[in-house]
């Protein structure tokens, strides 16, 4: 009796087959790991897909594109029917079927952040979809395509435009939600980079781990970006647009990609300059955004770098550069940084002498910037300007921002003086003069301290502490004012 004819032959073959399959599986896992490490894996397996879809993609292999087309058609149908949540799963399968087609990721992320999000009126629901669009690019698209500069540009655009701009009426909610997340992980808008680079406590290590794993932020690259373009406010979206565009520049392979990413950087820097500082109102528990004056030198250098590297758009970038410099002069003026404002005005005169002659003074430019109303003869418009600057001055004074309060007070005084000297004292001597400046101050303070229509009680108290004499005069005048007459019954019709 031969061994092949024995009753143990077939069971032994089965056991041998099982052992060989186990060995092949073990070897395959090792090969897959090596393929991934060497960047040889071009198509990733589908995760959490229905068995029919998973089986079909494995069997058909090269026909994955055809399957993706079918899923695209189904996704369009679902969007037309407003069935958005099923679309998330379809988008996941489509991107996994075509993981190295950059446009697939961009279209799916854009659809979530822009097209689907606006279908919801609740800001929290919109924010969920905007987050999903960002996560699709940041967490998944870049994992499969870490060297595709276009994906970095698209991710930076989500921060710069969808979150940072004001076209979506829920943009303030987006900004506040993102600021809270960054506050929790960074502690403030100015991170302690030494602690992030060399965490010595468990809390610091946990925050660095959260930065890397959840937000995909590298502390070393964050510090490099802040050193080059900052100091930046890392709780605001414009800073993250600059970060991702800067990381993308390292992956750019041609001039067009470099130019696109550079534009994102200088546009975001301009936004960060205009509203790159968070102003907290502790009385009303609200926040406001103000200019980040500390980045003016870095933003100026970035503009000049862009103009030097992008000859095709040099003139266009130059116009943006000139407007930036003029804004810098005006903002410095209104923040009572007169010396710095004068220095940057000289830079404007040197760079753009045709538009701004050497004899133009700082006060003249600041008044010119206010608008043509200042130089006109319309007394009501001028009064409105002066009161607006005084209101802003006292508002900043209540918040403790004395520099900006002083700057706006000086601007109000200069507008008032210009009208009185050039309109009343000039060829229009018979024209009615403005009310005295002190009287206008009292009017503004009285409105701000009005218990019904003015500042909140806490903020009004802070303002009173800053201007005790003027607020006492306003309170005394209000107490002496006669009470409004009580309403009388209307006469009976005849």
Image: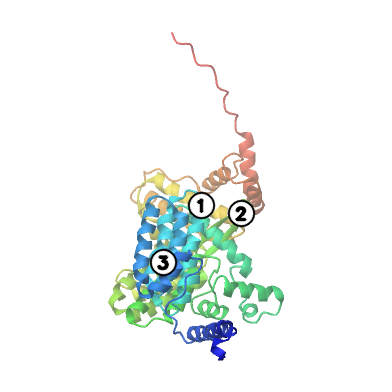
Quadrant of the image for the N terminus?
bottom right
Location of residue 354 with respect to 410 vertically, above or below = below
- Closer-to-camera residue (23/318): 23
Label located before the other in sequence (1 or 3): 3
Q: Is residue 35 left or right of residue 352?
A: right
In the picture as drawn, the residue positioned furthest to the bottom comes out as: 2
The residue positioned 49% from the left and 79% from the top of the image is 228
Q: Cα distance, mark 1 to mark 3? A: 28 Å
Location of residue 199 with respect to 454 vertically, above or below = below
Location of residue 13 with respect to 436 vertically, above or below = below
Looking at the picture, how far across and down is residue 491, in whole percent?
49, 13
- Return the mark for residue 94: 3
Q: Is residue 236 left or right of residue 199?
A: left
Rate crowding at label 3 as few (under 14), some (14 to 19) or many (20 or more) other CA atoms within 10 Å.
Answer: many
Quadrant of the image for the C terminus?
top left
Label located before the other in sequence (1 or 2): 1
Q: Cα distance, mark 1 to mark 2? A: 31 Å
- Closer-to-camera residue (127/163): 127
**How many marks on residues?**
3
For the question of whether residue 408 can be seen, the reply is no
The residue positioned 59% from the left and 64% from the top of the image is 181
Tag 1 secondary structure: helix
Tag 3 secondary structure: helix
- Closer-to-camera residue (256/61): 61
Label 2 belongs to which residue?
398
Looking at the picture, how far across and down is residue 291, in whole percent?
50, 64
Label 1 belongs to which residue?
123
Q: Nearer the viewer, mark 1 or mark 3?
A: 3
């Amino acid at each position: 009796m031969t061994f092949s004819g024995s009753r143990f032959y077939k069971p032994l073959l089965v056991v041998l087959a099982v052992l060989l399959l186990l060995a092949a599986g073990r070897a395959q896992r090792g090969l897959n790991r090596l393929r991934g490490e060497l960047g040889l894996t071009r198509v990733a397996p589908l995760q959490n897909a229905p068995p029919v879809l998973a089986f079909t993609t494995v069997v058909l292999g090269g026909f994955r594109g055809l399957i993706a087309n079918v899923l695209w058609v189904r996704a369009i149908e679902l969007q037309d029917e407003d069935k958005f949540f099923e679309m998330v799963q379809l988008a996941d399968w489509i991107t996994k079927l075509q993981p190295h087609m950059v446009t697939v990721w961009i279209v799916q992320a854009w659809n979530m952040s822009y097209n689907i999000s606006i279908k919801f009126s609740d800001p929290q629901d919109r924010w969920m979809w905007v987050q999903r669009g960002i996560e699709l690019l940041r967490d998944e698209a870049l994992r499969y395509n870490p060297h595709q500069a276009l994906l970095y540009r698209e991710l930076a655009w989500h921060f710069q435009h969808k979150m940072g701009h004001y076209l979506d009426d829920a943009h303030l909610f987006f900004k506040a939600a993102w600021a809270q997340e960054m506050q929790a992980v960074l502690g403030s808008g100015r991170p302690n980079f030494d602690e992030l680079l060399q965490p010595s406590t468990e809390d610091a290590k946990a925050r660095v781990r959260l930065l890397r794993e959840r937000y995909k932020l590298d502390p070393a690259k964050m510090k490099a970006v802040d050193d080059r373009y900052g100091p930046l406010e890392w709780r605001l979206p414009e800073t993250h647009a600059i970060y991702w565009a800067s990381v993308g520049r390292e992956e750019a392979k041609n001039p067009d990609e470099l130019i696109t990413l550079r534009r994102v950087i200088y546009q975001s820097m301009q936004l960060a300059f205009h509203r790159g500082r968070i102003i907290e109102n502790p009385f009303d528990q609200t926040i406001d955004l103000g200019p980040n004056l500390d980045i003016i030198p870095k933003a100026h250098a970035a503009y000049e770098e862009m103009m030097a590297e992008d000859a095709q758009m040099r003139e266009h970038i130059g116009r943006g550069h000139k407007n930036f410099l003029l804004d810098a002069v005006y903002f410095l003026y209104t923040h009572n940084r007169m010396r710095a404002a004068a220095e940057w005005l000289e830079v404007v005169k040197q760079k753009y002498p045709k538009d701004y002659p050497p004899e133009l003074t700082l006060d003249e430019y600041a008044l010119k910037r206010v608008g043509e109303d200042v130089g006109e003869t319309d007394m009501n418009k001028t009064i409105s300007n002066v009161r607006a600057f005084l209101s802003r001055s006292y508002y900043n004074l209540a918040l403790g921002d004395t520099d900006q309060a002083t700057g706006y007070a000086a601007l109000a005084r200069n507008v008032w003086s210009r009208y009185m000297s050039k309109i009343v004292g000039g060829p229009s001597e018979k024209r009615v003069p403005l009310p005295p400046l002190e009287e206008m101050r009292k009017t503004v303070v009285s409105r701000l301290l009005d218990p019904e229509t003015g500042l909140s009680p806490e903020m009004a108290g802070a303002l009173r502490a800053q201007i005790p004499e003027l607020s006492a005069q306003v309170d005394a005048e209000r107490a002496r004012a006669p009470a409004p007459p009580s309403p009388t019954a209307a006469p009976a019709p005849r």
